Image: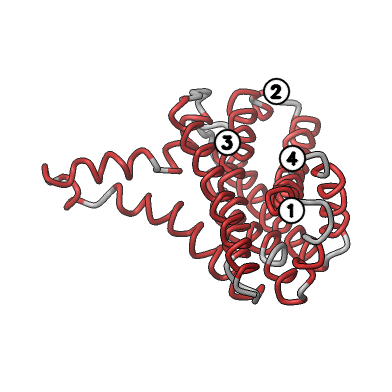
Amino acid sequence: MKHILTLLSHEIRMLLVSPATYVAATLFLAFMGLIFTKILEIYSSAPQELSPAAVYFQLFWLPACVMVPLLTMKCLAEERRLGTIETLLTTPVTTTEVVLAKFGAAYFLYVALWLSTSGFFFILRKFSGEAWFLDAGPLLGGFLFIAVSGLLFVALGVFASSITSNQSVAGIFSCVLLATLILGGNALSDSAWLAEAALRPAKAAIDYAHVFSHRDDFARGVIDTRHLLFYFSGTVLALIFSILSVEAKLLHA
């Protein structure tokens, strides 16, 4: 793993010169800016029980489902399409190092973009003069949830990019995976038919993977080790499958 830092710095530079990165950043910041503007309108019209930070992170899933595919769809798919993945692996690096470097670069940019929006709250605090608008608990909990859940989201995006040489297909597949994980679990958890006794194990598994409930716990400052285990183990599995997918494609090339 001695080449990982060299590969990681290279991948970060490649992301910073990619047009898709700036498309993702522009869409993300514009969307989050609109959300924050809407929050200001709500709070200026009537008192609210929740802090602005708690409301702000409720729509995390929409930018995640758009931004992650844009950041990851090229990482392995484009390498395979151009045939540069084979050339790269003839150097003294391993498939694991390559996949981890691409994952690390995408994750770094994902977290950096989210952290850049923290300026919204400092601006609001400065001009409103109300310390409540900068409630540290929900704000830190929300960003911690973004950082932890982002590990799995980005890993799924890398996996989607590892199974195809078409970056558009990789982006769509990544979006489907994320929407299924985030929105599918939320929809199934509210299904009445899962209340049947025979389906209780399935309901327990769906509740365990319920991303929205994880978000609510983090926003309240509740750091459940089961949530951490879910995201960390899911990230490791997605990266292992990505590595195996790349190696399988190389064997059949």
* Image position, residue 135 (x, y; %): 64, 25
**174 above or below 149?**
below
Asked if the residues shown at circle 1 and circle 4 are in contact, with their CB atoms under 8 angstroms apart, the answer is no
Q: Is residue 205 left or right of residue 110?
A: left
Q: CA distance from mark 2 to mark 1?
A: 45 Å
User: Which residue is the site of mark 1?
Assistant: 98
Taking the spot 74% from the left edge, 36% from the top edge, the residue there is 124
User: Which residue is the site of mark 4?
Assistant: 115
Q: Secondary structure at mark 3?
A: helix
Pick whichever of labels 4 and 2 is earlier in the sequence.
4
The crowding category of the residue bearing disc 2, from other C-alpha atoms within 10 Å (few below 14, some 14 to 19, many at least 20), is few
Q: Name which residue type carries label 3.
A: Phe
User: Which residue is the site of mark 2?
Assistant: 131
Q: CA distance from mark 2 to mark 3?
A: 23 Å
The crowding category of the residue bearing disc 1, from other C-alpha atoms within 10 Å (few below 14, some 14 to 19, many at least 20), is many
Q: Name which residue type carries label 1.
A: Val
Q: Secondary structure at mark 1?
A: helix
Pick whichever of labels 1 and 4 is earlier in the sequence.
1
Pick whichever of labels 4 and 3 is earlier in the sequence.
4
Q: Quadrant of residue 251?
A: bottom right
The crowding category of the residue bearing disc 4, from other C-alpha atoms within 10 Å (few below 14, some 14 to 19, many at least 20), is few
Q: CA distance from mark 4 to mark 3?
A: 12 Å
Q: Name which residue type carries label 2.
A: Ala
Q: CA distance from mark 4 to mark 2?
A: 20 Å
* Image position, residue 16 (x, y; %): 86, 57
**81 above or below 126?**
below
User: Which residue is the site of mark 3?
Assistant: 145
Q: CA distance from mark 3 to mark 1?
A: 26 Å
Q: Name which residue type carries label 4.
A: Leu
Taking the spot 56% from the left edge, 46% from the top edge, the residue there is 152
